[in-house]
Amino acid sequence: MRSGILLLMLALIWQPVSLSDQFAGIAAASGGRLGVFAQVIESGDSAGLNDTERFPMQSVYKLPIAMAVLDQVERKSLTLNEKVSLSAADMVPGLHSPMRDRHPQGGIDVSVRELIRAAIVDSDGTASDILLRLAGGAPRVTAYLRGLGVRDMTVATTERAMSKTPKVQYENYSTPRAAVDLLKALDAGRGVSPAARSLLLQDLAASTPGRLRIKGLLPEGTPVAHKTGTDGTRDGKTAATNDIGIVTLPDGRHLALAVFVRDSTAGLVPREAAIANVAKAAWDHWTARK
């Protein structure tokens, strides 16, 4: 009898920590508000933390913009090979833009395909603003999202506006759940053609920023199709340090993951480490149990 009670007590004491509790344990090291939603696409199994709160997307919003442009391509309003002439006025100052750095005075013609690749792979702010214009503007991109059933993600303004007035970035928001809804739509080919889906997943897999975020602690060579978003630090606070993506698990299932860190007073290293630890916790949870 006593041994049975003892075993019951030990079982209660040693109950495994839930994945959501693990996320909560990681949150303090982020120095800000941590928002997470993780879901295995094939099974629907999920876990989250602050997953219905709104977080500024920063460059994460380049993914829905690119998807909306590709929807215009599907509707024959644009073609991938169509050239767009860029002038000096199109070169957005004060933000990350390799395109602007190479051509500060403009005078170049760039294809729609090249703009998408620059926005997703290089997170180019100039390319993103041109794509937003081609998509028909922020309200049209948001309407496209609503058509996908993505309710809590809003594209409201440009990279140029965010660079001029940092508080504006909070208008381009998403909840972690909405970001995962977007990733699931992309994975399923909803709102994008098969060719567009393949193109975007290829670019997301080649995305260069954020190697220490979702990818940071995962096994070498793990396929990760992701898009980061990062604000600058002002007065010791960083409004946004983000990464969303689709991780391929060893058995071929797909983990859709969105991690946002809002208003952090920590440095870049602990912010990125928090994202990496969230991804590793999710990876361990769903590779240990199927």
Image (cartoon, grey):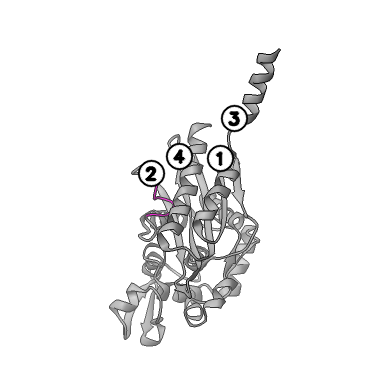
Label 1 to label 3, Cα distance in Å? 30 Å
* Secondary structure of residue under mark 3: loop
Residue 250 located left or right of residue 151: left
Amino acid type assigned to the residue bearing label 3 in the image: Trp
Amino acid type assigned to the residue bearing label 1 in the image: Glu
Q: Which mark is residue 249?
A: 4
- Nearer mark to the viewer, of 1 and 2: 2
Task: Report if residue 116 is visible in the image.
Answer: yes
| Nearer-the-camera pick, 13 or 82 | 13
User: What residue does disc 3 label?
Assistant: 14
Q: Residue 222 carries which label?
A: 2
Question: Is disc 1 in contact with disc 3, using a CB cutoff of under 8 Å?
Answer: no
Q: Which mark is residue 287?
A: none
Task: Report if residue 189 is visible in the image.
Answer: no
Q: What residue span does the magenta drawing correspond to?
A: 212-217
Residue 114 located left or right of residue 168: left
* Secondary structure of residue under mark 1: loop
Question: Is disc 1 in contact with disc 4, using a CB cutoff of under 8 Å?
Answer: no
Amino acid type assigned to the residue bearing label 4 in the image: Leu
Counting residues from the N terminus, which is met first, the one under dot 1 or under dot 2?
1
- Nearer mark to the viewer, of 1 and 4: 4
Question: Is disc 1 in contact with disc 2, using a CB cutoff of under 8 Å?
Answer: no
Question: Is disc 4 in contact with disc 2, using a CB cutoff of under 8 Å?
Answer: no
Counting residues from the N terminus, which is met first, the one under dot 4 or under dot 2?
2
* Secondary structure of residue under mark 2: loop
Residue in view at x 47 percent, y 79 percent: 163
Counting residues from the N terminus, which is met first, the one under dot 4 or under dot 3?
3
Label 1 to label 4, Cα distance in Å? 11 Å
Residue in view at x 61 percent, y 54 percent: 177
Few, some or many C-alpha atoms within 10 Å of disc 2 (few <14, some 14-19, many ≥20)? few
User: What residue does disc 1 label?
Assistant: 42
Counting residues from the N terminus, which is met first, the one under dot 1 or under dot 4?
1
